[in-house]
Image (cartoon, coloured by chain):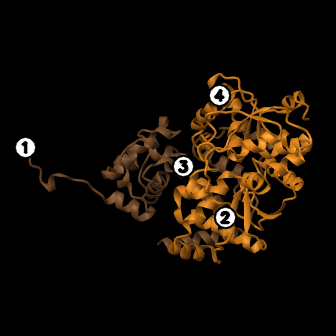
Amino acid sequence: MKIAYYPGCSLHSTGVEYDISTRKVCDVLGIELTEVKDWICCGSSPAHQCDELMSVALPAKNLALVAQTGDFKEVCAPCASCYSRLKGAQYKLADENLKKDVEQVIGTKYPEDITVLHMLDVIAKKIGVEAIEEKVQRSLGGMKIASYYGCLMTRPPKITGKDSYENPTDMDSVLEVLGAEPVDWNLKTFCCGASFALTQTDVVLELTKKILADAEASGAEAISVGCPLCHANLDGRQQQINEKFNTDFNIPIFYFTELMGLAFGIGAKELGVFKHLTEVEDFLKERALL
Amino acid sequence: MKIIGDKQIKIDTALAKEIAERSGENVFLCYQCKKCASGCPSREFMTSTPTQLMRYVQLGMIDEAMKQNTIWYCLSCETCSTRCPQDIDIAHVVDTIRIMVQEKKIKADTKNSRLFNWLWMTILRYMGRMYEIGLTGALNLFTGKPFKDMSLGMKMIKKGKLKLFPSFKKPLETKKMFDRAKRLSK
C-alpha cells in the first residue's frame, strides 16, 4: 500500500522516535510511505488562535503539496495536532468563498479529493488487527497498558468522523493482538495541556499529573500514545511533576508504533525508545523485550 | 404589576453579531446547560467557566468576555464543542474572541499567549517549519525567564530530540503566503 506521509515539525525534533518507529513498522506491514515534498508547518494551535485565514491556508498548502508529490489520494499524519489541522481545514474549505481566498493565498489549486488519516487509522482500519497479529514475533506478555488518545485524534467528531470519541478503542485492539492487556481507565481522551507546554507549564503539570495518576490507579504499567505533544508532556515532564507534587511517577510512555515494533521483533534501540526522557531500559529488560 | 418599557431592557448584541459574522456560530443558541463547563479540563484555572463566557457574549459584556484570562486558558481540546447539545463550536467562539482581542490590541490577561503566537507565526513565516530551540529561547528571553526548562532542554539535545539549527523549507514561499493573506484581509 502506498500512502503520502506528512510527518510534521515534531516528528523531526521532539518526537523523532515516533518517526523512526512509524517508518520501521510500516516497512514490516508493507506500507510504502512517501514523505510530502517540501512540506511546511500546519500552523498548529498558534495559527488558529491568531489568524483564521492562515490556519486554513497552511494545511491547504500542505494538501496541495501532497498532490504535487505524486498521485496520492491519501495522506497520513502521525501527529494528532497536524491531523486535526489538516482535517479541520478540509471541513472549513467546503465554504466556496473561503476556498477562493485560500487558493489565492497558497497560489495554487486546493485539491479536494485527498483523504487525511491519522497513523492509527492506517494501522487499525486499513491494515487491520488480523494482519498485525500475523507479524507478531514476540508477545508483549500481558503488559498492562493504558492507551491514551488525548484530544485531537477523535475530537471533534464532526471533523474527524470518528464514532467512538468518548471511549475510542482502536489503539486498545491493536495492543491486544500484540499480547498486551489494555486497562480500563477514565482519562483516555482527557487533555494533557499540549498547547500550553511552553507558556503555561503549570497547567500542563497539573493535567499531566492527573493522567499519570489515573493510569497508575487503573493498574497500568505503561502508557501508549499516538501524538508527539502528548508524549513530550507525559514522558518529558514526569520529573518536574515529581518535584512539584512530591510524587514518584516512573511510568514508561511508548508510542503505539514503538510497542508494535517491539512485538514485531525489532530491536529497542533501532526503534528509538532510548530517546525517551523517562527511562525504559529496566522496564524492557524485566519483560525480556530488550 | 410593574410595567417595563422596551427602552429599559438594554442588551448590546454587537459582540455576538461580530462573532457570528466571523465564525458562523450563534451564541444565542446557548441555554446554559453547563456541559461545557463540566467537561472543561482547564476550568479550574479560568476566572469564569465556558458557560459563563457564553452568557457574557450573549449580554454583550465585553470586559468580562474579552479581558479576563478565561479565553487564554482554553486548550483547544474540543471537549466543549464535542458535547454541546446545541452544536455550538465553543472552542471556535473562543478562538474568534482571541483573534479579536489580538487584532484590536485590547489589553487583556493573555498569559503570554499573544507573544507565543506571534513568535510561532514569525518563525513560520521566515522558515516554513518550526524551530523549537529558537521558539523556546525567544519566549523565555521576552518573558524574563531565560533559564526556564533549561535542564529539560539540555537532556533533549543530548538525546537528539531537538534540532540545533533551523531547517529552512521554502522560506520565500511561506513569506509570500503570509503577505498575500495580509493583503486579502485588508
Q: Which mark is residue B78?
A: 3
Q: Which mark is residue A213?
A: 4
Q: What residue lies at 50% left-to-right and 41% top-to-bottom?
A: B40
- Which residue carries the number 1 mark? B1
In percent of width and height, residue A249 lies at 71, 26
Task: Give the structural element (helix, strand or loop) at label 2.
Answer: helix
Task: Give the structural element (helix, strand or loop) at label 3.
Answer: loop
Q: Which mark is residue B126?
A: 2
**In the rendered structure, the residue with mark 4 lies on which chain?**
A
Mark toward the viewer: 3 or 1:
1
Q: Colour of chain A?
A: orange
**In the rendered structure, the residue with mark 2 lies on which chain?**
B
Check the image and name the residue furthest to the front.
Answer: A130
Q: Distance from label 2 to label 4 (Cα)?
A: 41 Å
Mark toward the viewer: 1 or 4:
1
Q: What is the three-letter code of the residue carrying label 1? A: Met
Marks 3, 2 in one chain: yes
Badge 3 vs badge 2, beta-carbon distance below 8 Å: no
Q: Distance from label 1 to label 4 (Cα)?
A: 58 Å
Task: Give the structural element (helix, strand or loop) at label 4.
Answer: helix
Screen quadrant of the N terminus of chain A? bottom right
Q: In the rendered view, tell whether residue A194 sits above or below residue A96.
A: above
Q: Colour of chain B?
A: brown
First in sequence, mark 1 or 2: give its number. 1
Badge 2 vs badge 4, beta-carbon distance below 8 Å: no
Residues A76 and B52: in front is: A76
Q: Distance from label 3 to label 4 (Cα)?
A: 23 Å
Screen quadrant of the C terminus of chain A? top right
For residue A289, side relative to residue A70 (left or right) = right
Count how many numbered circles sit on residues in the image: 4
Q: What residue lies at 87% left-to-right and 52% top-to-bottom?
A: A24
Q: What is the three-letter code of the residue carrying label 2? A: Tyr
